[in-house]
Image (cartoon, grey):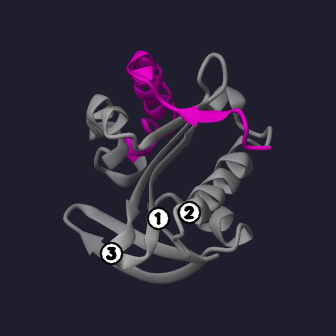
Amino acid sequence: MTADIRPATTADVPAVKAVTDAAYRHYIERIGVVPAPLEADHAAEVAAGRVYVTGDPVVGVLVLVPHKDEDHLFLDSIAVHPEAAGRGMGGRLLAFVDARARALGLPEVRLYTNAMMWENQKIYPRYGYELVERRVDGPYDRFHYRKSL
């Protein structure tokens, strides 16, 4: 189910940027600021081993940051190209996140989403995430979630 998800390579950086842009760009007008994933240094994230991709061509992207000192895996970004939406890709990516956290011996996954990205607020609870808090971080009004594994 998650076997086709692999660590991104330097050659994947343009595709990581393209998928992230396609998945997040439409939110700029709605939230009034550029979503953080659009401003990420994709090359640095790939070089750090934090990015995973799926598809040929790439249509799904994950950015995962282990926080072993805090006992959780942080899902920094999940992006599915709009042309691949509605085919279960998001669910497969989220299953991979759980598997990756378990493989790292981390008992929890954490993430946040912008308060204006209401679609995500419906999705994450369906995959076992619970709302922890709403917090403003700089220009971002975010809902923070966690999932115990």
Choose between 19 and 24: the one closer to the eye: 19
Q: Is residue 112 visible?
A: no
The Cα–Cα distance between marks 2 and 1, rounded to whole angstroms, is 6 Å
Question: How many residues crowd around disc 1 within 10 Å: few (fewer than 14), some, or many (20 or more)?
Answer: many
At label 1, the amino acid type is: Leu
- Residue 148 to residue 63: above or below: below
Residue at 55% in and 76% down? 107
Q: For mark 1, what is the residue?
A: 73
Disc 2 + disc 3, Cβ < 8 Å: no
* Residue at disc 1, secondary structure: strand
Left or right? Give the position of 31 relative to 122.
Answer: left
At label 3, the amino acid type is: Asp
Residue 50: mark = none
Q: For mark 3, what is the residue?
A: 69
Disc 1 + disc 3, Cβ < 8 Å: no
Left or right? Give the position of 23 relative to 90.
Answer: left
Rendered image quadrant of residue 101: bottom right
Q: For mark 2, what is the residue?
A: 101
At label 2, the amino acid type is: Ala
- Residue 14 to residue 52: above or below: above
Residue 74 on image: x %, y %:
43, 62
Choose between 105 and 2: the one closer to the eye: 105
Which portion, as a residue range, is magenta? 1-29
Name the image quarter holding the C terminus: bottom right
Residue 7 on image: x %, y %:
51, 34
Residue at 45% in and 72% down? 72
Residue at 45% in and 39% down? 51
Disc 2 + disc 1, Cβ < 8 Å: yes
* Residue at disc 2, secondary structure: helix
Rendered image quadrant of residue 68: bottom left
Question: How many residues crowd around disc 3 within 10 Å: few (fewer than 14), some, or many (20 or more)?
Answer: few
* Mark nearer the N terminus (2 vs 3): 3
